[in-house]
Amino acid sequence: MPRDGTTRFSFAATGEPIHNFIGVSSFTEYTVVDVSNVVRIGPGVPPEKACLLSCGVSTGVGAAWKVAAVEPGSSVAVFGLGVVGLAVTFDDDTSESHAPANNVMSGSSCRLECWPDVLVVVAQGCRMRGAKQIIGVDLNPEKRDIGKRLGITDFINPNDTGEKAVSEVVKEMTGGGADYCFECIGSTSAMAEAFQSSRKGWGKTIVLGVSSGGAPMSIPPHDILWGRSVVGSLFGGLKPKTDIPILAQKYLDEELELDEFVTHEMGFHDINAAFELLTQGKCLRCILWMDGARENGSVGVENGRACKAKA
């Protein structure tokens, strides 16, 4: 999509414009994108792995590295994606901003969002920065194992905390609160709960989730006076042109894990089945191959033959 917001695509019969999905339209076999959307990387990273750097992995790792600047030996709490696991976020229009996170997650409605793997990616980024304790918070117990493999040291299921708010449990586990809290849900209630989980004096809460409906986030000013802070994170604070090639090289150097996130691969004709897996919380990332691409060997970033299911 050109920078003026117009499009080069149109219906042949009517001339009606067809606009690009997120400015890229990677679900099409061929597309035209602005040069600002293109990043050059070396040939060593296969396209089915390189595509993971376009959003989720970069967003999570960057949030730990650049936005939070997690310090070695620190404690971290990562609030993940609730109702059906890492594949959904919450419609927070009607929730109370100070409700405990366990109640918010259990009662909220869900919608498809684009952060299915951010919890475990943030955990990986924090581990790479040397964090000592990384607590994952998620309603899906199946995320415990994948989280453990990628850096989570402890796991909290809000359904198992009884009458306690998640923030109380985090404070007990960390001896006063986590040094860094990451909110990856998009629920303003969970944002407030993540903030309450942070340590007085220097605790930092990083918001990655996108709240629907413009619901406000409420934090008592007195809590800010204790030295806590809240900061937003878009694409992990990374500069795509310079930072994505660095992440690609870290993958080649076996410093950054990508393979674990690819749980399914399908032909493009099964795209609806791929989205169904996401909504059911049964996959992290599903690679969609343009029909016939894998069989005839015509695979490569330059011709759009491999893309990621962004959902």
Image: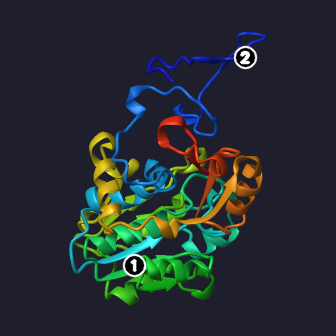
> Residue at left 35%, top 62%?
251
The vertical placement of 131 against 39, above or below, is: below
Marks 2 and 1: CB-CB under 8 Å? no
- Give the mark nearer the N terminus: 2 vs 1: 2
Comparing labels 2 and 1, the label whose residue is closer to the camera? 2
The amino acid type, in three-letter code, at marker 2 is Phe
Residue occupying image coordinates x 43% and y 52%? 53
Disc 2 crowd rating (10 Å Cα; few below 14, some 14-19, many 20+) is: few
Which amino acid type corresponds to the residue marked 1 in the rendered image?
Gly
Total labels drawn: 2
Q: Residue at x 30, y 43 (%)?
A: 239
Q: Residue tagged by mark 2?
A: 11
User: Looking at the picture, how far across and down is residue 120, in whole percent?
Assistant: 47, 70
Please provide percent x and percent y for residue 264: 64, 64
Q: Does residue 184 sit above or below 167 in this rendering? A: above
Of 42 and 238, the residue lying toward us: 42
- Tell me: 270 left or right of 81: right
Residue 134: image quadrant is bottom left
Residue 219 found in image quarter: bottom left
The residue indicated by pointer 1 is 151
Q: Secondary structure at mark 1?
A: loop
